[in-house]
Image: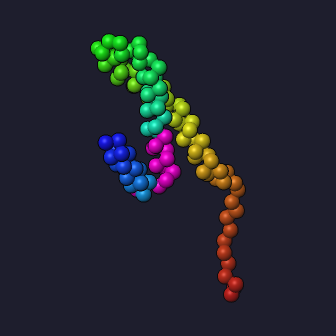
Amino acid sequence: MTYLFLYVVGIILVWWTYRVGWLEALKTVVKVIVPSALIILFNIKAGRLLFKSPLVGLLSTLPTSIFIIRGSTPLVSFINNWIENKINKYDGSEVIDTDSVPLDD
């Protein structure tokens, strides 16, 4: 079942990369992976305390997830800006705009 899930995710990533380009696809993956990893790490660390009682665990999962997603927004934007700067490192260079003149004149 895990392989099927990973296969579907891989197909979706390839399709998304084809649709919007690899830079935007990479930014989207970062937007999804960073908060998800932080939520998983939080649940691993706090799981012993939160999930002793299933009711407390269910009631606390959604608010903590929303808090972590909103809290990770600066980190995600920092990573996306870093990716953008690495890819477009030549945007700040000066470009001289010239006109072409035919040789017959």
**Residue 59: in sight, yes or no?**
no
The answer to whether residue 103 is above or below residue 96 is below
Residue, far left:
55
Percent x, y for residue 102?
A: 67, 82
The residue lying at 34 percent from left, 17 percent from top is 57
Looking at the image, residue 73 sits to the left or right of residue 99; the answer is left
**Left or right: 88 with respect to 18?**
right
Residue 98's quadrant in the figure?
Answer: bottom right
Question: Magenta stretch: residue 25 in it?
Answer: yes
Q: Going 69% across and 54% down the picture, which residue do you hit?
A: 93
Q: In the rendered image, which quarter contains the C terminus? A: bottom right
How far across and how far down the image is residue 31, in percent?
Answer: 46, 38
Question: Is the residue 47 above or below the residue 7 in the image?
Answer: above
Where residue 36 sits: x, y (%)? 43, 32
- Let me know if residue 10 appears in the view: yes
| Most distant residue in the bottom direction | 104
Query: How are the colours assigned in the image?
Result: rainbow
Q: Nearer the viewer, residue 17 or 96?
A: 17
Compare residues 3 and 61 and report the one nearer the observer: 3
**On the rendered image, what quadrant is the N terminus found in?**
top left
Residue 42 magenta-highlighted: no
Rendering quarter of residue 52: top left
- Residue at x 66%, y 75% (from the top left corner): 100
Magenta-tinted stretch: 19-30
Q: Main secondary structure of the magenta part?
A: helix
Residue at the (47%, 20%) spot, across then down: 45
Above or below for 3 versus 55: below
How many numbered badges does the structure rendering display?
0
